[in-house]
Image (cartoon, rainbow, N blue to C red):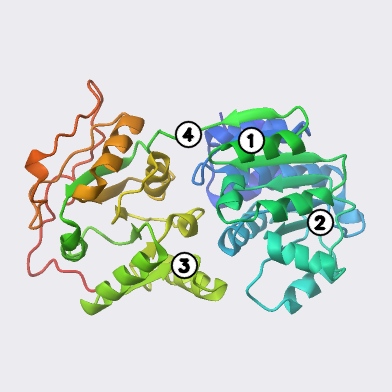
């Protein structure tokens, strides 16, 4: 199927062509007709599946059909998202897909002065992209009224729960008109999120893509068994590989992320951390530096990394193994996007073996073990890992996943 077959209007098709979009992703193919039919939607999809376009494109078309450019500039669409980074990315998407239309939008989030955001609101907008805290703040000050909302999008609902925003979300929902179209997106559906969906959706159509335990097909995966005390040296060793151009390193904790950055700085590798204790400005600066190539290593916790969308991200490293298998899937899904190949490496110590077994079981994959490296786990030979039988090995040969990184004096990276 092509975008031409989705009954999209010419200005949007032209914008998609300018962006180089040819074929819709599965969620776009399924969701766009549902949204255009003005039905409620429950979308189970993680980031990287194209879900922003799946709701932004039909929303722009619906507003165009309502001749929104001729109506008073009152907020007709509200997109609620958990973080500043996601809000900015969604705003950029509306700019790209709506470049040939006249709808106005604004993005509001906390951590910065509200003056410029208030000015944008006062000029009049059709679409508001907001984080919960700043939205409620500006509502309490009388700058935002939700009386005219016809479409409400709740993005990353499970992450709202993780970050403690679920009560703020419920406060916002209570202010919305009863008669509206609601689009609800979540990568996972824990009980509280399912309950929330049941209360705010009316006869929704269900769209589910990329099952939680399915890993990206174009991501070459491997695991290094290593003593916990040697992970720092192993990371330095791996990062010397010249094929690693841009890497996202995952830790379990905020403190762990900061410690990894500090260790990398000691060996002259430029890196920055992104996690919940960082200010909005610091997080955005680190992400911008990473996207622009000013730093090649971004160290992140799971919550902070959800929603990071970086072109040409070559590698993901699980410095610490996640306790939840689905988190592993989310992590490695940062690479191998839009048809590009990627590499995911995991550093597993003795205490993490049980978590690694769970990942193998849930993903139903036989992930290659890299044995030829300088810091092998002392007890690795005594640890029995029983991978699934008769499963294809997800493995793409390269300097890292095909064996130990190949280094020589001329290949050392300049970070």
Q: Secondary structure at mark 1?
A: helix
**Along the horizontal axis of the image, is 18 left or right of 65?**
left
Tell me where residue 15 appears, x and y as whole percent: 64, 50
User: What's the residue at 42%, 40% (across, down)?
Assistant: 326
Quadrant assignment, res 415: bottom left
**Along the horizontal axis of the image, is 333 left or right of 175?**
left
Give the Cα distance between marks 3 and 4: 26 Å
The residue tagged 4 is 210
**Residue 406 in the image: above or below residue 225:** below
Give the Cα distance between marks 1 and 4: 18 Å
Tell me where residue 271 appears, x and y as whole percent: 34, 72
Q: Residues within 10 Å of mark 4 (few under 14, many from 20)?
A: some
Residue 415 in sight in this render: no
User: What's the residue at 70%, 40% (across, down)?
Assistant: 183
On residue 287, the disc is: 3
The residue tagged 1 is 194
Q: Earlier in the sequence, mark 1 or mark 3?
A: 1
Q: Nearer the viewer, residue 257 or 79?
A: 257
Mark in the foreground, 1 or 4 = 1
Q: Secondary structure at mark 2?
A: loop
The residue tagged 2 is 126
Q: Earlier in the sequence, mark 3 or mark 4?
A: 4
Furthest toward the front, the residue is: 351
**Along the horizontal axis of the image, is 19 left or right of 288?**
right
Q: Are marks 2 and 4 in contact (CB under 8 Å)?
A: no
């Amino acid at each position: 199927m092509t975008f031409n077959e989705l009954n999209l209007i010419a200005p949007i098709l032209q914008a998609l062509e300018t962006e180089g979009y040819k074929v819709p992703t599965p969620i776009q193919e399924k969701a766009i007709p549902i949204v255009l039919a003005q039905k409620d939607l429950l979308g189970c999809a993680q980031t990287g599946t194209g879900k922003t376009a799946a709701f932004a494109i039909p929303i722009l078309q619906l507003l165009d059909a309502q001749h929104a450019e001729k109506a008073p500039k009152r907020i007709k669409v509200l997109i609620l998202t958990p973080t500043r980074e996601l809000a900015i990315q969604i705003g950029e998407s509306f700019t790209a897909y709506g470049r040939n239309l006249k709808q106005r939008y604004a993005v509001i989030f906390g951590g910065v002065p509200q003056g410029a955001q208030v000015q944008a609101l006062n000029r009049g907008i059709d679409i508001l992209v907001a984080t919960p805290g700043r939205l409620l703040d500006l509502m309490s000050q009388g700058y935002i009224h939700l009386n005219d909302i016809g479409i409400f999008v709740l993005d990353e609902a499970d992450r709202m729960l993780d970050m403690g925003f679920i009560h703020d979300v419920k406060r916002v929902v209570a202010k919305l008109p009863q008669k509206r179209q609601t689009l609800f997106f979540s990568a996972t559906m824990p009980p509280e999120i399912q309950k929330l969906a049941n209360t705010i959706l009316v006869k929704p159509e269900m769209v589910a893509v990329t099952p939680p335990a399915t890993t990206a097909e174009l991501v070459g995966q491997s695991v290094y068994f290593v003593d916990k005390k040697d992970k720092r040296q192993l990371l330095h060793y791996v990062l010397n590989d010249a094929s690693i151009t841009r890497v996202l390193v995952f830790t379990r904790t905020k403190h762990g992320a900061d410690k990894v950055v500090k260790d990398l700085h000691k060996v002259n590798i430029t890196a920055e951390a992104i996690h919940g204790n960082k200010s909005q400005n610091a997080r955005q600066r680190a992400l911008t530096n990473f996207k622009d190539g000013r730093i090649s290593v971004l160290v992140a916790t799971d919550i902070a990394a959800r929603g990071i969308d970086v072109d040409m991200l070559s590698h993901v490293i699980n410095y610490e193994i996640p306790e939840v298998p689905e988190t592993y899937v989310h992590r490695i899904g940062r690479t191998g996007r839009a048809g590009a190949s990627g590499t995911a490496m995991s550093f597993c110590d003795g205490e993490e073996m049980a978590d690694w077994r769970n990942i193998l079981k849930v993903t139903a994959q036989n992930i290659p073990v890299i044995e030829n490296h300088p810091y092998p786990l002392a007890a690795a030979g005594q640890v029995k890992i029983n991978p699934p039988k008769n499963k294809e090995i997800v493995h793409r040969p390269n300097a890292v996943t095909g064996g130990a990184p190949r280094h020589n004096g001329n290949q050392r990276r300049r970070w």
